[in-house]
Amino acid sequence: MTTIEVLDPAGQIHKVAALQCNPVAMPLQGCRLGILDNSKPNFKRLATLVAERFRDNGSAVDIAYYRKENPAVGAGDELLDRIARSADLVFTGSAD
Amino acid sequence: MERRGVAAVVLASSAFYPKALHDCRTLGLPDARIAEFTHPLGGLSDGQLVERAAKLYDNVLRQLKKVPPQRPVEMHSASADRLLAPADPAELQLWFFERHLSDGFPVIAPTAAAVADMVKGSRRSSGDLVGIVPPRLGVATVEQIAINAVMAGCRPQHMPVLITAVEAMLEPRFNLASLQATTHPVAPLLIVHGPISKELGMNAGAGAFGPGSMANAVMGRAIRLVLWNIGGGLPGSADRSTQGSPSKYSYCIAENIDASPWGSFITDRGLPQGSNAVTVFGCEPPHNVNDHEHGDAEGILHVAADVLRALGNNTWFIAWHGQKELMVVLGPEHAASIGNSGWSRPQVREYLFSAVARRRDELASGGMYHMRDWPPALNMLPADALVPMVPSADDILVLVAGGAGKHSAVLPSFGATVSVSREIPGV
């Protein structure tokens, strides 16, 4: 096959410092759970149902609920900082 | 949250799992805990949610028990700059398509020579960084934009417009990351203002939104290919648009300043009449306003407002930190009738602002009412109170494009985006 050389239209990706997930000590005990709602219908209910299971079996002592300003805008630093101060584990969503 | 030292689990529906994975990798967290559940989430009964939650709980537990690999994470391997592709034109098209590097239409081979010519048209250095395009966080240098411009069929003289448009789309208030990812069928509309549109042979007249002008077609397509290749906005992956839109192929017009009773739209943006400039606006495809009945401003704008105020428009319900906009593109005959009625552009905006408003209880009957992003005070209004669609009359953008006929267009926006206008430097 005869070939030609072309330039890659996708190109380089901006490098973001890679992260490791923060460790979670299992089994969970006395955890403060946070729910960051993506503002989509039913997410609050679904995440709360899951969180309540953790609370009911003693894994979690507290469930705090937070909501993004709207589904099309990322959670701001102020909200994320607030959650970080009050939760040990956070559930968030990617769904519609 | 992980960057703040707090463990997190993403609860992702099966349809959104690939996007969640893509987003986490892009943000530097390739081993993110993502617990999947069966799509959809919206529209489920409480019983169905309870059922979903039971299974999801098990998936969350599995994710929490997962031991993150203790290794330096190597990610974002750089793509090769030069690739070997088939020389045969038909095979070349297939080669690009199979690698998800084209939108499905034929492309021009971006050889080093063709790209170098394109870069020259920008009057900038090939390595100049224009910005980082989400969600892939692709590096948009002048050369990288030029590669996509070649593929789209652009000419070197199109480059200043394209670079200015990319810069405009990367302003934070344009919210490009959300435009690329949303289920809404939004595409950035590129509007070119000023003498440059004629110099480039753009069509501001009959069929301005449609086919038939090379400059409109290829510059709009180049913007799409930038979003596709550099930005990674591929349908079904990072781009979650439910139905997509024909405007996602190419969406570019020139303003018909000659037919405007009020001069160029760009003067609303603080630029002098006659400036060469671009505006980018994240919106739906044009919605037609057919009015053959009226010859006066109020009659025509009454019909335009009726099209604009549809309950299903995103613009009602979401905003960019409280800001949102609408666009009305008047056909020349409608514009002339409105101008001959003695109405100024601010008067057009004021009329539409009032005429578009809907009763609060009507808004509560559908759309995204419960996800609304309007000031809390509005929630206290009585059911019959009128709710404006945008915060102020100034948020209704009015310009002229098109040819003969009694048609205009309205363009509801994605909602969480604000248009950006920029002067094109050096032309």
Image (cartoon, coloured by chain):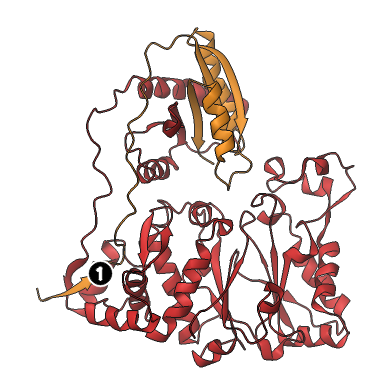
Chain colours: A orange, B red
> In terms of depth relative to the viewer, which is nearer, B318 or A69?
A69
Q: The residue tagged with tag 1: helix, strand or loop? A: helix
> In terms of depth relative to the viewer, which is nearer, B171 or B53?
B171
Q: Is residue B248 visible?
A: no
> In terms of depth relative to the viewer, which is nearer, B40 or B267?
B267
Which residue is tagged 1?
A: B94
> Pointer 1 indicates a residue of which chain?
B
Q: Is residue B400 left or right of residue B178?
A: right
Q: Would you place residue B365 above or below residue B225 in this image?
A: above
- Residue B128 percent coordinates (x, y): 36, 69
- Residue B238 percent coordinates (x, y): 42, 51
Q: Is residue B89 left or right of residue B313?
A: left
Residue at horizontal 35%, vertical 75%? B146
- Residue B181 percent coordinates (x, y): 49, 52
Q: Would you place residue B265 above or below residue B327 in this image?
A: below
Residue at horizontal 38%, vertical 19%? A24
> In terms of depth relative to the viewer, which is nearer, B1 or A1?
B1
Q: Would you place residue B352 above or below residue A26 in this image?
A: below
- Residue B219 percent coordinates (x, y): 46, 78
Q: Quadrant of residue B100?
A: bottom left
The amino acid on which the numbered mark 1 sits, given as a three-letter code, is Leu
Classify mark 1: residues with Cα within 10 Å, few (<14), some (14-19) or many (20+).
some
Q: Is residue B274 visible?
A: yes
